[in-house]
Amino acid sequence: MNLHEECLLRYLKIPDELSYSTEILKLNNFILEKKFISKNFVAKSLTFSYTDE
């Protein structure tokens, strides 16, 4: 069961904690976004090629 499913299940069991589940999902998405950006953009933009002329 992934995090989204766990949060949905928690919401169905305890509807009053929707804001808590939402915050967990926001944090998880933020972490995934940072990992994606650092893996796909930052590492590639720091690669330089030098030639001797």
Image (spheres, rainbow, N blue to C red):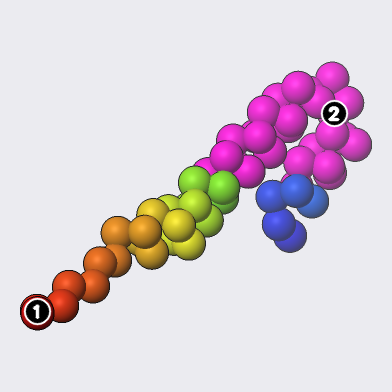
Residue sitting at 81 percent across and 25 percent down?
Answer: 18
Residue 41 in the magenta stretch? The answer is no
Nearest the viewer among 36 and 8 is: 36
Q: For mark 1, give the secondary structure.
A: loop
Q: Earlier in the sequence, mark 2 or mark 1?
A: 2
Question: What kind of residue is marked 1?
Answer: Asp
Q: Which mark is residue 14?
A: 2
Nearest the viewer among 25 and 38 is: 38
Quadrant of the drawing holding the N terminus: bottom right
Residue under circle 1?
A: 52
Drawn side of residue 24 relative to residue 15, left or right = left
Drawn side of residue 19 relative to residue 48, left or right = right
Task: Mark 2 vs mark 1: give the one in front.
Answer: 1
- Residue 34's place in the image compared with 2, above or below, is above
Place residue 45 in its image quadrant. bottom left
Question: What kind of residue is marked 2?
Answer: Ile
Give the CA distance from mark 2 to mark 1. Answer: 66 Å
Nearest the viewer among 29 and 3 is: 29
Q: Magenta part of the protein: which range?
A: 6-31
Question: Measured from the top left, where is residue 37 in percent x and y?
Answer: 49, 52
Quadrant of the drawing holding the C terminus: bottom left
